[in-house]
Each structure stands twice: as C-alpha cells, then as structure tokens.
Amino acid sequence: MRQPLVAGNWKMHGSRAENAALVRSLLDQLQPGPGTEVLLCPPFVYLSDVARLLTDSAVALGGQSVCDEPQGAFTGEVSAAMLKDVGCSYVLVGHSERRQLYGEGDALVARKFVAVQSQGLVPVLCVGETLEEREAGHTTEVVARQLDAVLAVSGAAALASAVIAYEPVWAIGTGRTASPEQAQDVHAMIRDKVAALDATIGGSVRILYGGSVKASNARELFAMPDIDGGLVGGASLKADEFAQICAAAD
Ligand code: PEP
C-alpha cells in the first residue's frame, strides 16, 4: 500500500502575512485522513517561517530547488544541508520551470537528486514532456530519458527513498489537465520501468501527477491505479481548494 502524498508548490508567490494566513487556514481545514501525507514547498526565504507555523502539525516542508554542490562559492544557491537545517524533509528536483527557464539539464538534475539524498532528504523528481514532444509521439522517450539520467548516477535502489512526479509541461499552470487515462498511461510506464530494475521498488515508489490539479479534477486523477497523489501549483495557494485536493487523495 503506497501512502498518498499531496505536495503544494507555491512557486514564487506569497508574503509573510499571506503565508501565515494560508497555513493557518489550511491547518484548520486539513482532514488528514488515515493516510495522506501533505507537503508544502514555499520559497526559500519563507521556509523557516513556514516551519514554525507547521510545528506540531503532520504537514511536511520541502524546498522548491537545491544546489548540486554541498557548500562554497555558489552565490545565490542553497544547499541540501541548509534545507535540512531549516526543517525540510523533501526537495523538488527537475521541476519543468527549472529545466525550461533556467536551463537545468538531465545531468544537473541527477546531481541535485544525489545532493538531496546525501543529506537524508527525499527528492521529488519531476519529469514530463512538452506539448511539442507529446504531439510528436515522444512522451515515453522523453520521460524515460529523464529517469535514466538519475538511474545512471544513483541506481534503481535510490528510488526506494524518492518520489517521482509526472508533470506534463503543457498542463502546468495552463488549466489544461492530462486526462486521468493520459496520466495513468505515463505513470504505468514509469512504474514498469522502475519495476523492471527492481520489482519491490517499482511497486512501492510513489508517483505523483502534476499539471493543473484542482479540487474539481483531483478525485478522478487520484483514483487511477498508478497515481499516488499530486504536485499542485496554483491550487495550493488557496487553503480551501488545497484541503479538498488533499481529502481527494484519501
Ligand atoms: C507545479 O507547479 O508543479 C504545477 C503542477 O502547477 P499547476 O498545478 O499550477 O499546474
């Protein structure tokens, strides 16, 4: 049995006051059913604030990105050890906005994955194809390539303490969601690929769907056999909507 996980990626949104209101309202509304784990990924500068707000709650904290190096002269970067120090237990790596807007390639994403695990944190490895790639029939090839880059460096065993998020780029922030069947097809492919290397890990690794998840579509997405929760951007900024999405994962 895989424990569902719903992660909120706040991206570059919020202020101290807005975050406090959002977290308080969310904690009031969350009905963590018997199983769903909830994760919040605020901007770096608010991590400590949000960690304090989450004290005594079961909600986990995560970074939106990380440096692949452990420390040193890397101006503007944040290490995995720093994220751990301020209370993170998860870190997103390879989000499509990092890949597309900041030129993060597969090799760098793989190094970030390693850096996160070296601190005992759990990487949420984001993979997904662009619209062009999907329309050209390259979805499987692109997602497999993104996974292979990490597998080549870390090996399949590393996925025992990682989460994978399938996020079709064309569905992120666009309001256009993959259908449950489209998402399930890719999730099944990912799980089969991991299972071919290690059947136990293939069966246990959590694979989240991300891309315009909302309260209105979460239930049917999460009902698919290989979808173990969601990575939620825009809708995680609204406490009531995000709480409903979390409830849909139970
Ligand atoms: C995301 O930020 O990873 C995401 C999926 O965004 P949205 O839910 O807004 O599409």
Image: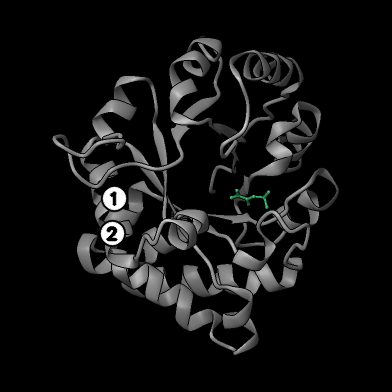
Point out the residue furthest to the right here: 216
Above-or-below relation of 202 to 206: below
| Residue at x 65%, y 45% (from the top left corner) | 232
Mark 2 secondary-structure assignment: helix
- Kindly indicate whether the residue at mark 2 contacts the one at mark 1 (C-beta within 8 angstroms): yes
Residue type pointed to by label 2: Leu
For mark 2, what is the residue? 108
For mark 1, what is the residue? 112
Q: Would residue 212 be found to the left or right of residue 190 on screen?
A: right
Q: Residue 211: x, y in percent?
A: 67, 57
Residue type pointed to by label 1: Lys
Point out the residue furthest to the bottom here: 136
Q: Which image quadrant for residue 67? A: top left
Between 51 and 220, the one lying in front of the other is: 51
Q: Residue 241: x, y in percent?
A: 80, 35
Mark 1 secondary-structure assignment: helix
What's the distance in space between the residues labelled 1 and 2, CA to CA? 6 Å
Q: Residues within 10 Å of mark 2 (few under 14, many from 20)?
A: some
| Residue at x 64%, y 13% (from the top left corner) | 20
